[in-house]
Structure formats: C-alpha cells, structure tokens
Amino acid sequence: MSGSPPTASELRSQALDALGQASNQDELSDWHRDVLGRQGSLGQALRNIGQLPKEERRDAGQALNQLRQELETAFNDRQDQVRADALDARLVDERIDVTLPGRTQPMGGLHPLTQMQREALDVFAHLGFQTVEGPEVEYGYYSFDMLNIPKDHPARDVWDTIFIDSGEKEITLRPHTSPMQVRTMLAQDPPVRVVVPGRCYRYEAQDATHEWHFQQIEGLAVDKHITLADLKGTLAEFARQIFGAARQVRFRCDYFPFVEPGVDLSIDCPFCDGSGCRVCSNSGWIEILGAGMVHPNVLEWSGYDPEIYSGWAFGMGIDRLTMLRYGINDIRSFYQNDLRFLRQFQRARI
Ligand code: PHE
C-alpha cells in the first residue's frame, strides 16, 4: 500500500459520492460490496489502523465505526429512494387509459336459413318430434321407387332431378327430403315422430323463387289411429309459433304419389292478415308446404302394416319460409354470400 491510508473523512466523501451515483439495484449492490463488504474500502481502512501510531488508533477506530453506521443508513435511504423511483417510472409506463373505447372483436353469425331451420326444429321438438338427418346423395330407389313413384311414371318429371352417372344403381342428388320417410321406417318400429332438415337439389332454371339447391324440412308421424286432423293440428300450431298466434291454416287437395290423400297447406297472409296484398297476390293465402296421409304402399314397403298403422307426412321449404318471415323477395340472396344482406340477420345465437 503506497502513501498514507485515506482518512475517515476522505472515505466518507468518496463513498457518499459514489452512493449518489448508484441509480439501480445492481449498482447499489456493487457499491455495498465495494464499500461495506468484507473486502471493501471501509474494512481495508479498519485493517490499516494497526499501522498508525499507537495514540491515534483509538480515535481512528471510533471514527471509522461511526462512519460505517452513517454509510449503512445512507445506503438504506438511497435504496428506498431508488426503489420508489423505479415504481414511479413503472406506474407512468404501464398507465392505461380506461376511458379509451375497447376494440370490438369481429363476430360471426348464423345464416338466416340456419336460424330459421333451428327455430322450426325447435317448435317441432316441443311437439315431440325428433330430428334425424339423411344422405344428400341418395339412391333413386329411395328418392322415387320406395315413394311409390315407379320408373317411367310421369310424376317422376315433377322432381327435376340431378342424377349422378353411377353405372348399375341409379343415384340422385336428392330432390326432396322424403326418402327419409322410408329410411326412418325401415330403421325403426312405430310409433314414429321425426323431422328431417336437409339440403335438396333440382335441375331447374334459377329465378327469384327457384334455386337449383334449397333446404327442406320433412315431417313424419306414424302410429295407430293417426288422422289428417293430427296433421292439421300440428301444422296449425307450427304456423302460429312461427308467424303469429292469429294465423289460420287452409288445406287444399294436391297430388303427391307417396300420400293419399295429398294436400297443400296455406296460411292466411301474415303481411295483410288475409285481406289481400302483393305478397299473397291478393289471394289472402300463402302456400307453405305439401303434405298428406302416408300412402299404404309406402307404409307396407317400409315394413309397417297399413291395416294397423297410419301416418302423415309433410315437406316444406325452409328458404320459402324464411323469405316469408322477413319479406325477402329473391331466394338467390341466401346463396350469394353478400355480407350486406347477411349482416341484417346477425343476432345473438339461439
Ligand atoms: N316431397 C314433396 C316435395 O318436395 C313434399 C311432400 C312431402 C309432400 C311429404 C307430401 C308429403 O315436393
């Protein structure tokens, strides 16, 4: 060691200077080690006392011990200060403006046809009908033969069917959901109460009321003693749930090979309450579905004894129902994926 060791007051001013410079926890730790640590400058000075003349040693020792206490206190104060500064800086840094408007998450919605389909199925569910689904690519056997529409029968032309070139077995894109009447009866014993939602296909020119694909809901109820009155009651209830409590229903004769008798069902126009308007072509009535009592042949071929069991079936277009419900005048709107159209139906999920 060269020259005389630093005095307590020299050590003091050096140490306090350095402490004032320390501005984070790392620098503070370094300072503590360099000054107050075992190998630190204060310890050195204490060890050097032995080299002083005997009469100076006591005072020098006392002065250094006082200094140690003073520096400890200064260190603690400085450390508190540094921590408080760091906290302030963080508070400023992480400040959030709770008055800023939030970022909205883009949210999808259900297609109007899906909404309508779910609503309709829900009504039938409460009336005791189970929902089942069937294939869109369907054998001609189920699309026609089993539904009492033999090959070369002119009625087959009513369903402008899209056929799949398939070799041996005739395969169709189902033109209606009625094949599921047969599939359901083949698969289970009576009683039956099912509704069948699904997409159907027809080879026809498109316009405001025709699409080459569309959606139907088929209904089928078979049991002992089922009559047309049950059909009327069920569908009247459905119409009232969907179009309002005041709705009237009207049956008229119609022809479908797989029912006997066949009917079509109209409701009094929900837009004019039956007094006549543009939507109902001034007739006061709007046709919404085809229906009838299941033909004995269909029951029998599906394994149900027509002497014991009877039933009814209906088929309705979901597209048409949705158009009526919302006053939409072009069926093609449903399939164009135009968000300006679709957004109008955005709402909370059911
Ligand atoms: N499947 C018929 C159609 O698509 C509708 C229908 C179903 C008629 C059930 C009577 C009974 O036109």
Image (cartoon, rainbow, N blue to C red):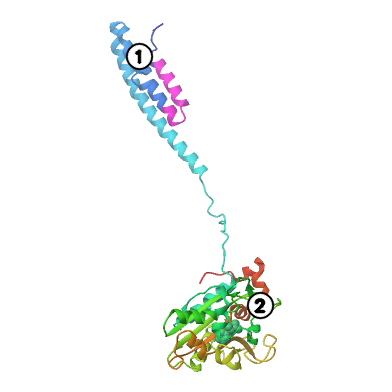
Callout 2: 10 Å neighbours few (<14), some, many (20+)? Answer: some
Q: Name the outermost residue toward the front.
A: 168
- Tell me if residue 196 comes above or below residue 59 in the rendering: below
Front-most of 11 and 259? 259
**Amino acid marked by disc 1:** Ala
What residue is shown with label 1? Answer: 45
**Left-right relation of 89 to 175:** left
Q: Earlier in the sequence, mark 2 or mark 1?
A: 1
Image-quadrant location for residue 276: bottom right
Question: Which is more foreground, mark 2 or mark 1?
Answer: 2
Looking at numbered disc 2 in the image, what kind of residue is underneath it? Answer: Ile
Judging depth in this view, the residue of 92 and 333 nearest the camera is 333
Which quadrant contains ligand 1? bottom right
Q: Which residue is mark 2?
A: 328
Q: Is 298 colored magenta in this rendering?
A: no
Q: Residue at left 57%, top 64%?
A: 108
Q: CA distance from mark 2 to mark 1?
A: 96 Å
Q: Image quadrant for the N terminus?
A: top left
Magenta stretch mostly in which secondary structure? helix
Is residue 10 shown in magenta?
yes
Query: In the rendered structure, which segment of residues is drawn in magenta?
Result: 9-28
Asked if residue 225 is positioned above or below residue 127 in the image, the reply reads below
Q: Which mark is residue 198?
A: none
Residue 148 in percent (x, y) is at 56, 86
Q: Position of residue 44 (x, y in %)?
A: 35, 14
Task: Check disc 2 and report its element: helix, strand or loop.
Answer: loop
